Amino acid sequence: MIVEIGPRPYVARALPDETRFFATDPAADVAGLTTISWAGLWRALGDPATELIVCHPNFSAPFAPRALGRALFSSRFLRGRSPLLRSFGVELLRWRARAPIAVVDHEDLPVINRDNLFLLDRCALWFKRELPVDHWRVFLKTAHPNLPTPRFRREPRNLARVEKLRPISIGLSFEAEGLLPAAPAPKTADVFFLATVDGSSTARERGLAELRELRAQGLAIDLPDAPLPRDEFYRRCAAAWLVWSPEGLGWDCFRHYEALACGAVPLINQPSIDRHAPLIAGEHALYYDPEPGGLTRAVLAALRDRPALARIAEAGRAHVLAHHTPAAIARHIVRTARGAGDEDS
């Protein structure tokens, strides 16, 4: 049996017959951490039949001042649906966990917050979406007051921590299921882009100016000026040769994988993170240098060889459907964590 603790079921949706899920968010319409199920969670964490515990970490400790304030003064607290008590479910792992723990961290944050260092010490593996290329940077301003020094990196405790880190992708969302096009679509646009720019990454603001200039020069650049329904968004992706997919709050982005699943090629700024089952340049995706003019050069170069774009889109779609669906990611987490548990036993 697998026990999963988090705001929403992830592994439990991929492996429902093997997984018992406990919700840390009262909005989840599943069996959650109510006062009735606390004993059930406690028993499950110590049950010899539990072979793996999958945990989605809290952003901060539930007893931290900010977390307490947000919980106590929220409208959900007044309606009796505060996440305060439920969020303590993760904290039980401080004292009780017979099985190996796999932490799944899909947050935008490129560090591990200080409040979660106990979980890093307790777990067998920590799967992190925004894992810096230099893994030691997850401790920036958390386990270390500044950039981790050579002395910090040589300490056995910290070496053991960093050896647990593994990259994981955000992949496709559960909401994409059933909406993605089943076959390639005729191309009517050279480049498609739709995402939040105001308040997001500076890479988006800089690149958008270049796309507008390319449109003024006569390229077919599809830039909707308002949000689209998800099915229409996917239709517009499928109708473009390229989907510009610059990083937002994190480098890894749903759009990287959605574009390929729709039969288009994502054009992404050069990666700044370690990646799981990476999209290889020229094989599954295209990358550009973020300096001024880099996006323009990449777009023009890519459009000169449209048959190559069709080949990349086909190979990339197969790669995404094999490795970056929620079910594929969940199975990878469980398979890898079970292996780590066997090594520790």
Image (tube, grey):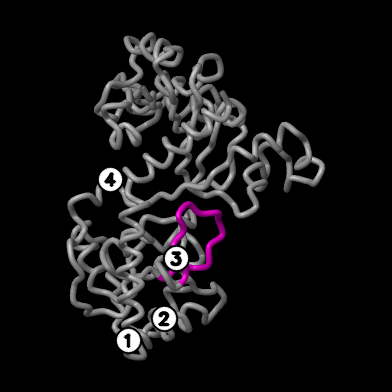
Mark 2 touches mark 4? (CB < 8 Å)? no
* Residue numbers of the magenta segment: 267-281
CB under 8 Å between discs 3 and 2: no
Q: Is residue 308 left or right of residue 291?
A: left
Q: Is residue 108 magenta?
A: no
Q: Nearer the viewer, mark 3 or mark 4?
A: 4
Decide: few, some or many residues near mark 1? Use Cα within 10 Å; few <14, some 14-19, many ≥20. some
Q: Secondary structure at mark 3?
A: loop
Instruction: From the image, state whether disc 1 or disc 2 is nearer to you.
Output: 2
- First reached walking from the N terminus: tag 3 or tag 1: 1
The label shown at residue 219 is: 1
For disc 4, the marked residue is 174
Query: Type of residue at label 2?
Result: Val
What is the C-alpha distance between the residues marked 2 and 4? 30 Å
Circle 2 — which element?
A: helix
Discs 1, 2 touching: Cβ within 8 Å: yes
Q: Quadrant of residue 312?
A: bottom left
Q: In 3D space, how far apart are the residues under numbered discs 3 and 4 (Cα atoms)?
A: 22 Å
Q: Residue 303: x, y in percent?
A: 36, 84
Residue 268 on the magenta segment: yes
Q: Are marks 3 and 4 in contact (CB under 8 Å)?
A: no
Pointer 3 or 4: first along the chain: 4
- Find disc 3 in the rendering and name its residue: 246
Residue 262 at x, y percent in the picture: 26, 64
Q: Secondary structure at mark 1?
A: loop
Q: Which residue is mark 2?
A: 299
Q: Kindly report which numbered mark, 3 or 2, lies closer to the viewer in this rendering.
A: 2
Quadrant of residue 115 within the rendered picture: top right
Q: CA distance from mark 3 to mark 1?
A: 19 Å
Q: Residue at x 35, y 88 (%)?
A: 216
